[in-house]
């Protein structure tokens, strides 16, 4: 059995005049996250975890911010492409566990939709995806509400 573990981390700062997307879900908030794409910090961390587990580089290698075709792109498309890369290289996803770190907005009500979105994009059962949200008790850049961070870990298995 060839099982691999991957870890992903991403962070984006808040910006006025942008929509907020986390885990493929649009969340009503007074600010969005700044990035070349839609800046979905959770989906980016998941992409990096999956790419890392398969030793396929990172999100910056596959979707560089120097490429204008990714300007404003929906990160769900990035995750779908990442899953295709894994499948093309003979991997299947076992599970994903992720944590979003944000003082605000409160995310608990959005977690079921995030889990569902990630599971659908990854072609795995929703019970194979876990999403948690936490604050940093007003410490650090997330605690000062300057941005949001996310960590993700995954297990994948070589099947081909």
Image (cartoon, grey):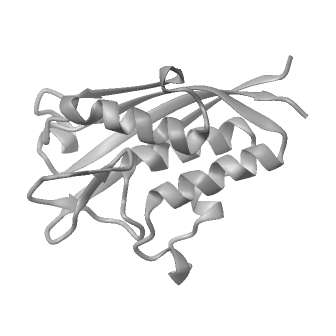
Picture coordinates of residue 7 (x, y %)? 56, 33
> Horizontally, is 152 left or right of 13 in the view?
right
Q: Is residue 30 left or right of residue 58?
A: left
Please determine whether, in this image, residue 41 is positioned above or below residue 102.
Answer: below
Nearest the viewer among 3 and 142 is 3
Residue 59 image position (x, y, % from top left): 58, 56
Q: Name which residue lies at 26% across and 46% down.
A: 148
Residue sitting at x 45%, y 47%: 43
Q: How many marks?
A: 0
Q: Is residue 25 visible?
A: yes
Is 159 drawn above or below residue 14 in the view shown?
A: above
The image position of residue 21, as x and y in percent, is 30, 54
Q: Residue furthest right?
A: 160
Q: Within the image, what quadrant is residue 153 found in?
A: top right
**Residue shown at 54%/22% (left/top)?**
128
Quadrant the C terminus occupies: top right
Q: Quadrant of residue 20?
A: bottom left
Q: Is residue 147 above or below residue 143?
A: below
Relative to the observer, which residue lies in front, 71 or 140? 71
Q: Furthest-bottom residue in view?
A: 68
Q: Quadrant of the N terminus?
A: top right
Identity of the residue furthest to the top in this view: 1
| Residue 44 coordinates in the image, percent (x, y) | 47, 50
Residue 56 in view (yes/no)? no
Residue at left offset 59%, top offset 31%: 124
């Amino acid at each position: 059995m060839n099982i691999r573990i991957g870890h992903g981390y991403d962070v984006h700062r808040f910006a006025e005049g942008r929509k907020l997307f986390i885990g493929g879900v649009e969340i009503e908030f007074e600010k969005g996250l700044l990035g070349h794409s839609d800046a979905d910090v959770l989906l980016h961390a998941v992409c990096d975890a999956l790419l890392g587990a398969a030793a396929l580089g990172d999100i910056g290698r596959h979707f560089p911010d120097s490429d204008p075709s990714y300007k404003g792109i929906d990160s769900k498309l990035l995750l779908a492409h990442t899953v295709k890369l894994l499948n093309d290289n003979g991997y299947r996803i076992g599970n994903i566990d992720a944590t979003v770190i944000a003082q605000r907005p409160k995310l608990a009500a959005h977690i079921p939709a995030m889990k569902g979105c990630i599971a659908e994009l990854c072609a795995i059962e929703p019970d194979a995806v876990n999403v948690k949200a936490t604050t940093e008790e007003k410490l650090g850049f997330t605690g000062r509400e300057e941005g949001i961070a996310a960590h993700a870990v995954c297990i994948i298995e070589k099947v081909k």
